[in-house]
Image: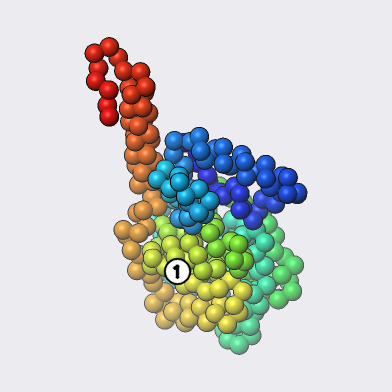
């Protein structure tokens, strides 16, 4: 089994320095694809890209996405009452190449237009990547808090205590296939997700699951509208979501592991059949 947790050829984060390097990567990927008994892609769009390059191998390409582990949330009860300030939480570093300028500029504009929001909105960033330059540029020191990396159980508690979860991705077309791992974690706390993402799989997952307040990553008007609606809903006490359980459970670790087990069982069965055909034991009928 070959498990592609990220694309290989065609990955915008992997830029071979010369045409010769690109050709070498392509040959290596082709060798892996043709010799593996099963191929796993981590998103549907990544599977489609592999099927496009290797149409004759479609039947052995599967999708097993990342997900969340229900056991990690054992004993964690998300808060249902609103905080004194609408608290927007972001888990981990911002997406590679994401420019926070549109989000911070819209946040600053909202605070300028609605003065009460300065004392009633808080953004908490958990991760090692500092955005101090942008924070200071838009005078958001009193609004945006930066917190260092913390143990995962602590982070999950913080997400459950927030009012809104924030997901940011680059608006580049090249990243529409990407689903940040935090997307799946965000499915579990039961909070609205302000998703600044391109049209693609991450947006689709959040919208199907009933969590997404989605808008284009670089569209200031869309971000402003979404942020303002969230703030008004929070003030009115109607900041709620309607999770679609059958969708969220598709991304639970137990469900994903069961899918993997079925693929492995099928691989073992096919291998045993091929082995018996190649070298049947004395008196054993050859399976046609």
Q: Residues within 10 Å of mark 1 (few under 14, many from 20)?
A: many
User: What is the x, y in percent for residue 2?
Assistant: 50, 38
Residue at 65 percent across and 53 percent down: it is 13
Q: How many marks?
A: 1
Farthest residue toward the bottom?
Answer: 113
Q: Is residue 157 above or below residue 173?
A: above
Q: Nearer the viewer, residue 67 or 135?
A: 67
106 relative position to 247: left or right: right
The image quadrant that residue 210 belongs to is bottom left
Badge 1 element: strand
Q: Residue furthest top?
A: 282
Q: Quadrant of residue 239?
A: bottom left
> Which residue is drawn at the image coordinates 70% and 60% (left, top)?
130
What residue lies at 61% left-to-right and 53% top-to-bottom? 10
Residue 6 position, x and y percent, is 56, 49
Position of residue 36 measured from the top left corner of the image (x, y, whole percent)? 48, 36
Task: Say if 68 sits above or below 133 in the image.
Answer: above
Q: Which residue in the protein does label 1 denote?
A: 212
Image side of residue 16 versus residue 70, left or right: right
Nearer to me, 159 or 84: 159
On the image, the x and y values in percent for residue 26 come to: 62, 45
Q: Is residue 166 visible?
A: no
Q: Observer-nearest residue: 57 or 85?
A: 57
Q: How is the image coloured?
A: rainbow
The answer to whether 225 is drawn above or below residue 260 in the figure is below
Q: Quadrant of the C terminus?
A: top left
Please say whether residue 205 is visible from this viewpoint.
yes
């Amino acid at each position: 089994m070959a498990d592609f947790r990220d694309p290989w050829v065609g990955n915008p984060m992997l830029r071979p320095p010369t045409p010769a390097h690109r050709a070498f990567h392509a040959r290596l990927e082709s060798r892996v694809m043709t010799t593996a008994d099963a191929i796993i892609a981590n998103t549907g769009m990544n599977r489609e890209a592999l099927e496009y390059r290797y149409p004759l191998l479609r039947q052995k390409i599967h999708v097993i996405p990342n997900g969340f582990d229900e056991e990690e949330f054992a004993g964690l009860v998300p808060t249902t009452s609103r905080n004194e300030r609408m608290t927007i939480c972001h888990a981990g570093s911002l997406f590679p190449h994401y420019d926070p300028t549109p989000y911070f500029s819209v946040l600053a504009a909202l605070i300028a237009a609605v003065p009460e929001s300065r004392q009633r909105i808080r953004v908490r960033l958990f991760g090692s990547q500092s955005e101090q330059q942008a924070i200071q540029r838009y005078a958001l020191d009193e609004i945006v808090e930066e917190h260092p990396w913390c143990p995962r159980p602590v982070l999950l508690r913080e997400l459950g205590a927030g009012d809104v979860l924030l997901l940011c991705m680059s608006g580049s077309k090249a990243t529409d296939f990407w689903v940040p791992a935090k997307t799946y974690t965000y499915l579990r706390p039961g909070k609205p997700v302000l998703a600044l993402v391109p049209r693609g799989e991450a947006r689709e997952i959040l919208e199907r699951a009933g969590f997404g307040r989605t808008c284009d990553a670089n569209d200031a008007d869309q971000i402003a509208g979404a942020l303002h609606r969230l703030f008004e809903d929070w003030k009115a006490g109607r900041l709620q979501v309607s999770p679609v359980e059958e969708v969220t459970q598709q991304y639970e670790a137990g469900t994903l592991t069961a899918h993997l087990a079925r693929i492995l069982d099928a691989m073992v069965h096919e291998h045993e059949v091929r082995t018996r055909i190649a070298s049947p034991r004395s008196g054993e009928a050859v399976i046609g």
